Image: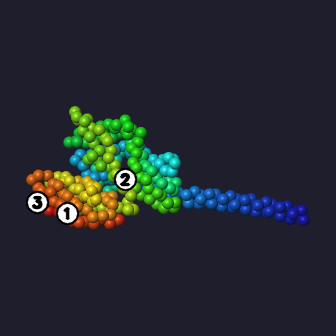
Amino acid sequence: MKTLQRNKSVILKKIMYVALVGLLIMQLTSCDEDTTNDKQAQLTVRMTDAPANYDAVMVDVQGVEVTGNGGSAVMLNTTAKVYNLLELSNGVNALIATGDVDAGTISQIRLILGTNNTVTVGGVVYPLSTPSAEQSGLKLQVNKTFEAGVEYSILLDFDASQSIVLKGNNEYQLKPVIRTIDTAISGSIKGSVSPLTGNVLVTATSNGVTYTSVTAANGSFLIAGLPLGTYSITITPVLPLLPITITGKTVVVGASTDLGITILL
């Protein structure tokens, strides 16, 4: 009887030992994960565009890579697909990539495009060739410091109207013009025009720097990613209507300055 009790006691001690070891391993693993998370920031990358005078602009996004401290590169989790840039205008954007990056200075983002890029003009679809220098990925300078445990968002403003070059004989080339926008330190200007006269050019200028957009089919416009400051806005319709300039409009971080409806004369 004593032997049986002694065996039970030994077995119970072994079980308790195994349980304690397992608990210790779980705690160590948890500490490692917390340490890793404490050294990283969370990044989301979105893409937007201004309206352009095309029926469609299809861009084949295959990957988004971030270069950080010492040139180390991290490939983000990318939603790889063909995006119609003209569906991403006037405040609409698409989430294209997310991921964790090491805290510190992020020097650049590399947007990797595939070969399935096209432009539709007058109902006809044309392929968009890409210069060989950009086939390995379009490098966009960021130079921003990320803090551990903080979520960041960067908006890629893909300017379709300036990114497509007509080479002649109905041959089009894609030479991407993209502006990186830190949404946490920028604002925007929005409004609309009347009467509708097709796409109307809208520019916002502050401290010698000009940002451009065109109106959508309903006459509305939005210029996003503007640094805080005071802006002059020029609205240029097609002739015989005359340009209109609005001055002294202030842009603040995290808000959209509404110009209301501008009547074209």
Residue 108, image x and y in percent?
Answer: 43, 49
Q: Residue furthest left?
A: 240
Q: Farthest residue toward the right?
A: 2
| Residue 77 in view, yes or no | no
Residue plotted at (57% across, 57% down)? 36
Residue at label 3? Answer: 265
Where disc 1 sits, the SS reads: strand
* Location of mark 1 (residue): 246
Label whose residue precedes the other's in the sequence (3 or 2): 2
**In the rendered structure, which amino acid carries the disc numbered 3?**
Leu
SS of the residue under disc 3: loop
Left or right: residue 1 versus residue 259 is: right
Image coordinates for residue 149, horizontal then vertical, percent: 51, 61
Relative to 75, is 86 on the left or the right? left
The answer to whether 180 is drawn above or below residue 169 in the figure is below
CA–CA distance between discs 3 and 1? 14 Å
**Residue indicated by mark 2:** 180
Give the crowd class for mark 1: few <14, some 14-19, many >=20 residues within 10 Å. few
Left/right placement of residue 211 relative to residue 185 reads left
